[in-house]
Image: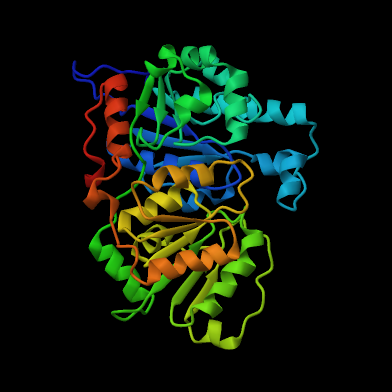
Amino acid sequence: MAERGTPRGNGMRARKPRILFLPMEGRGLGHLSRSCKLARSLQSTASCLIGTGVRYAGNLVPEQCEYVRIPGLDGLFESRATERGKVPFVDLTPEQSVDFRRQLLCTLERMFRPDLIVTDILPAGDYSELADMLARSHAKKFILLRSILGIESIGAIRRFSLEALTQFYDALVIASDPRTAQVDEDLQFTDRERSQSHYIGYVSTPVSQKEIEGARYRRGLKPGDSWIVCSAGSGFYNTRNFDDWMSLTKDFTGVHFDLVLGPSYMGNIPSGTPSIFFEGRVRVTTEQPDLRIAHAAADVVLSHGGYNTLTETMEGGAPLVVDVRHDPLLERRRHALQLQPYYPIFVAQSPSELKLGLNEALNGRVNRRPVRATKSLKFDGCDEFGQLVSEHLGLCVPNAATN
């Protein structure tokens, strides 16, 4: 296997640099999705491998990248399995489970020999399973942070310590416009951390007008039809919201609805009148292959406020109604409020506020404002990340929009 940093010239063909993404294995899909978008933007200039325990990875990883699925936290730790209504797939103590994952990750790094390792939110992983691998690897190391961190993530980074963060990592990459980020305040950065911080902007993929028109055509919409996409992300947090979202389809009888519950949704879909489903005005699914395009093409998007749903909607300019009633990590409401000065977002904390927000959006009180057209927010996270990688690895990275 070729060594890291094989030089160009002397008749030798230099291998493409290798990047290992290790996204946080959260309860949703946002961390993995964000890493996949970054990997996609680099796939022509670097060999990107994603290591994850998320079962849904095969549906998200770009075709020219690869992934290794290791046993997930939900299948190893009883506390995580119970949240999903499951039991662990193997009888291991928590200590044995951590060691199992630690050895798998060390083997992955040793065999792939990355030039750059990109972790996500948690500096050493959920259970410090990344610590040994990061300490031994000679690769450059980036940690990817979001605009707003949840209370669990803030606590984990503080326990790791900011001093260790800057010693382990070459760059602290904040996937946000600096005006909407609160990482500095939440973690109480000093000049030492700020000197390694890079606000790359939101990580998102552009959506063309042709893609938007195609999505609306496939949905069977006619000119003038209104379409609301209710998007629950992975579905983990939104089981309790479904009844209220379903009730809205009966309040807005002239509107088409897609309720996308997410691959992790565990609730029972309540019965509805046959006309709601059989006439096609309302569709209820757990997964939608072109959901990114649907978010951009809808007239209104109702969601729980996850990072990727927000950015994908903003690509098309539809107003957002964010349901923040079940926000245990206290991050989604904060993020939506930070975005409000720059984008039409209605924050709802009750069923009546959900209805009010949809009424305002549908009655033309909120104009459609594609975020790239208004340039109201920094939305070139993929390009900026590519430039940062180039600086550290000496790559020639093309504009992400051309990939």
Residue beneath the point at 45% across and 18% down = 169
Q: Position of residue 201 (x, y in %)?
A: 33, 37
Taking the image as shown, residue 163 lies to the left or right of residue 19, namely right
For residue 380, above or below residue 205: above
Q: Position of residue 370 (x, y in %)?
A: 28, 55
In the depicted view, which residue is nearer to us: 81 or 5? 81
Q: Is residue 43 something one can see in this rendering?
A: no
For residue 63, above or below residue 48: below
Q: Quadrant of the C terminus?
A: top left
Q: Position of residue 377 (x, y in %)?
A: 30, 43
Residue beneath the point at 32% across and 26% down = 389
Taking the image as shown, residue 97 lies to the left or right of residue 344, namely right
Q: Quadrant of the N terminus?
A: top left
For residue 167, above or below residue 254: above
Residue beneath the point at 30% across and 62% down = 367
In the depicted view, which residue is nearer to us: 329 or 135? 329
Residue beneath the point at 49% across and 36% down = 148
Q: Is residue 381 something one can see in this rendering?
A: yes
Q: How is the image coloured?
A: rainbow
Residue 223, by quadrant, is bottom left
Q: Position of residue 323 (x, y in %)?
A: 54, 57
For residue 280, above or below residue 60: below
